[in-house]
Amino acid sequence: VQLVESGGGLVQPGGSLRLSCAASGSIFRINAMGWYRQAPGKQRELVAVSSSGGSTNYAESVKGRFTISRDNAKNTVYLQMNSLKPEDTAVYYCNADILPHGLAFADYWGQGTQVTVSS
């Protein structure tokens, strides 16, 4: 099982980016899928999470600007980021709670994608 992220990059303040994360491998079921971020010198923090039933939760700092969504048929989670600020600059990591065939539920992480907000 692996998570592959895409969509990071450099954007000006006020701009938008859309991150994608696709889970692949021998997957029986996926529960929560979410996004975390880690800025230089800071701890990794939760950005947004989506349950398998569609409920969502956001960090206060991104509420109203970021939207998490998922396509369960494609085992993919998205993060639409609008009105980006320099303080959103970080490496963004995808995370998913996955039940592979024949194994137990486990926490999986993507490799991370850099988001830089700068003029």
Image (cartoon, rainbow, N blue to C red):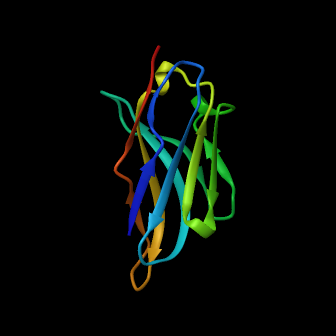
Q: Which residue is at the far bottom?
A: 102
Reply above or below: 1 against 34. below
Quarter of the image containing the N terminus? bottom left
Who's the residue at 44% across and 68% down the image?
24
Residue 31, image x and y in percent?
56, 66
- Please state which of residues 54 and 23 is positioned toward the viewer in this rendering: 23
Asked which quadrant contains residue 84, the reply is top right
- Please state which of residues 43 and 84 is positioned toward the viewer in this rendering: 84
In this rendering, the count of numbered labels is 0
Q: Which residue is at the far top?
A: 119
Image position of 27 (left or right of 50): left
Who's the residue at 57% across and 49% down the image?
78
Residue 40, image x and y in percent?
32, 28
Reply above or below: 58 against 103. above
- Please state which of residues 91 and 105 is positioned toward the viewer in this rendering: 91
Q: Which residue is at the far left?
A: 41
Reply above or below: 41 against 76. above
Asked which quadrant contains residue 83, the reply is top right
Who's the residue at 62% across and 66% down the image?
72
Who's the residue at 51% across and 19% down the image?
12
Image position of 48 (left or right of 67): left
Residue 14, image x and y in percent?
60, 20
Residue 91, image x and y in percent?
38, 37
